[in-house]
Image: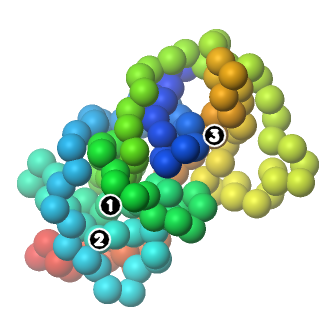
Amino acid sequence: MAEQQLLIFRAGRRLCALPAAQVAETLRPLPVEALPQTPDYILGVSMLRGEPTPMVDLGALLTGDRLASPQRVVSLKTGPRRVGLLVSDVVGVRSTAALGNARLPTLIEHCAPEVVQQLAKLDDALLTVLKLGSVIPDDVWKAVAKGAA
């Protein structure tokens, strides 16, 4: 991974990161309207800056268990769209130079290739570096667009 800035945050007890360049903003959780027939990790849609935005429970996406009380939303840029990640808290921004470089162990490198980019060490904690560009299925985007019409 080339050196870049990462936004570090928690999803429950798990320490996670995303490239800061993908992050639009962080904010308090917003009211969410349920969307029928979506994956369990998609809680529904919130109005974020005037746009309907799918809200993803990061705990449910990573482990199948919903976060008990998400305190922040990390708004991600996915091309012209936005996705909101519900997280437990935001820790800060760190450079990838501060990470202990580690390759995904062979046993898990194929388990979640669409979500996990890298496992790393930050201080004495395991850090899951995420890649979430296609976490929202196309049919959900269609439902969001239809609801906004």
> Which quadrant, please, contains the C terminus?
bottom left
Instruction: Say which residue label 1 marks.
Output: 55
Q: Secondary structure at mark 2?
A: strand
Which of the labelled discs sits on residue 44, or is there none?
2
> Where is residue 62, by image quadrant?
bottom right
Residue 74 in the figure: left or right of residue 20: left
Q: Amino acid at mark 2?
A: Gly
> Where is residue 107, by image quadrant?
bottom right
How far apart are the alpha carbons under marks 2 and 1?
A: 6 Å
Q: Is residue 72 above or below residue 17?
A: below
Q: Is residue 35 above or below residue 56?
A: below
Instruction: Say which residue label 3 marks.
Output: 128
Q: Amino acid at mark 3?
A: Thr
Q: Crowding at label 2, few (<14), some or many (≥20) Cα neighbours within 10 Å?
A: many
- What residue do we see at 38% from left, 87% from top? 37
Sequence-wise, the earlier of marks 2 and 3 is 2
Q: Secondary structure at mark 3?
A: strand
- What residue do we see at 74% from left, 20% from top? 100
Sequence-wise, the earlier of marks 3 and 1 is 1
Observer-nearest residue: 145 or 69? 69
